[in-house]
Image: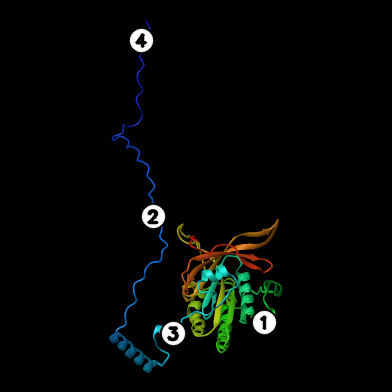
């Protein structure tokens, strides 16, 4: 006798859900944003000077000058705060700096990675300064400056006094002596150092190879001695330009800048102007590479609004030409 068979429904596996699945959330609609206004913001009016306030300020100035000398205090409106500059030869570069050229009596740092055009730019600036009657003193810490490259860029090598210091301490001593002499001239002058990161410390040359170097020795030296170079620049026409490199940060977070300029916080604080160079591409004539395109960004400025960028074409034969519109954080 055949057994009757019935097809039973399969029992679902797993535990039954206690709560039903939530309904799919509706897609978010893009929010329309109003365009940022570029119109100038109205400034609040300047405070009015009353007779009582003016009298109190006069009394303060009198007391300070009586104790510390006539040059110890004064009203800001009585000081000549105009920045003395010399044109760099690039209209775009002068525009992003914001004061019409490279400043004198200030410290300028030009930083960037390898092969971005730092040495080419500083030689170009030296040639432009010489054409305007400015005496340039060049300190070659990398000991790589050559007649052929400098001449190709336009430098008059007969007019270029040059030193090759062996240590950072030696370079600072020579720059301090040069500032002492140049400040007596009634004409502008420039001191250029290429480069700050390449020069070793004296303590590094004297220690054995198997001995660990002192940590933050360079930053400590700059913190203690940069003021000795910067303070004498006040009231002179002597400018300082330092070339520096960038280093990669270890364990940098995804949201912070991946590089930094060595030298510690003191160097960043003392600099009046910091320009960072980044190589953007090559300039070609047919299949031959004849130069590079470099982006220059104002990373810091005590002279004008920072964060402006422009591109320059730096040719291997020494020519420099503007290669892009001036922008501020990507906004033309």
Asked which quadrant contains residue 72, the reply is bottom left
| Mark sitting earlier along the chain (4/2) | 4
Q: Secondary structure at mark 3?
A: loop
Q: Mark 2 sits on what residue? A: 34
Q: Earlier in the sequence, mark 1 or mark 3?
A: 3
User: In this rendering, which labeled residue sits more in front, label 2 or label 3?
Assistant: 2
Tag 3 near tag 4, CB within 8 Å: no
Circles 4, 2 touching at the beta carbon (< 8 Å): no
First of labels 2, 3 by sequence position: 2
Considering only order in the chain, which callout, 4 or 1, is on the residue closer to the N terminus?
4
Helix, strand or loop under label 4 = loop
Give the labeled residue for mark 4.
4
| Distance between the alpha carbons at the discs numbered 2 and 1 | 57 Å
The residue that appears at 43% across and 90% down in the rendered structure is 71
Write the residue at 64% across / 78% down: 131
Residue 252, position as x, y percentages in the image: 47, 60
The image shows residue 211 at horizontal and vertical percentages of 56, 72
The span from disc 4 to disc 2 (Cα, nearest Å) is 76 Å
Q: CA distance from mark 3 to mark 4?
A: 113 Å
Q: Between marks 1 and 3, how big is the CA–CA gap?
A: 34 Å
Which mark sits nearer the N-terminus, 3 or 4?
4
Which residue occupies 56% across, 89% down? 184
Estimate the x, y position of residue 70 in percent, counting from the top left.
41, 92
Q: Is residue 157 left or right of residue 167?
A: right
Within 10 angstroms of label 2, few (less than 14), some, or many (20 or more) residues?
A: few
- Mark 2 and mark 1 lie on one chain; the one further toward the N terminus is 2
Q: Is residue 169 left or right of residue 35?
A: right
Where's the N terminus, which quadrant? top left
Residue labelled with disc 1:
159
In what element is the residue under mark 2? loop
**Residue 79 bears which disc, if any?**
3
Q: CA distance from mark 2 to mark 3?
A: 43 Å
């Amino acid at each position: 006798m055949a057994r009757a068979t019935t097809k039973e429904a399969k029992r679902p596996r797993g535990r039954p859900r206690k709560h039903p699945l939530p309904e799919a959330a509706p897609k978010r609609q893009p929010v329309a944003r109003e365009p940022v206004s570029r119109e100038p913001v109205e400034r609040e009016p300047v405070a009015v000077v009353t007779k009582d306030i003016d009298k109190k300020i006069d009394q303060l100035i009198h007391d300070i000058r009586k104790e510390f000398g006539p040059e110890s205090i004064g009203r800001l409106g009585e000081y000549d705060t105009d920045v003395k500059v010399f044109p760099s030869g690039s209209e775009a570069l002068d525009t992003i700096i914001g004061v019409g050229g490279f400043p004198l009596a200030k410290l300028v740092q030009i930083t960037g990675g390898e092969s971005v055009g730092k040495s080419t730019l500083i030689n170009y600036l030296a040639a432009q300064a010489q054409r305007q009657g400015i005496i340039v003193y060049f300190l070659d810490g990398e000991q790589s400056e050559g007649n052929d490259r400098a001449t190709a860029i336009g430098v008059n090598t007969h007019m270029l006094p040059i030193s090759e210091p062996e240590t950072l301490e030696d370079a600072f001593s020579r720059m301090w002596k040069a500032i002492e002499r140049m400040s007596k001239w009634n004409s502008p002058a420039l001191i250029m150092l290429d480069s700050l990161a390449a020069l070793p410390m004296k303590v590094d040359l004297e220690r054995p190879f198997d001995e660990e170097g002192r940590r933050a020795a360079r930053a400590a030296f700059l913190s203690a001695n940069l003021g000795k170079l910067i303070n004498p620049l006040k009231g002179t026409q002597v400018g300082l330009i330092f070339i520096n490199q960038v280093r990669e940060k270890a364990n940098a977070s995804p949201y912070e800048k991946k590089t930094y300029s060595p030298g510690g916080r003191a160097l960043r604080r003392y600099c009046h102007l910091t320009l960072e160079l980044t190589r953007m591409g090559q300039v070609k004539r047919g299949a031959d590479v004849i130069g590079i395109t470099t982006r220059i960004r104002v990373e810091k400025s005590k002279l004008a609004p920072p964060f402006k960028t422009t591109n320059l074409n730096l040719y291997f034969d020494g020519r420099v030409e503007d290669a892009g519109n001036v922008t501020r954080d990507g906004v033309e």
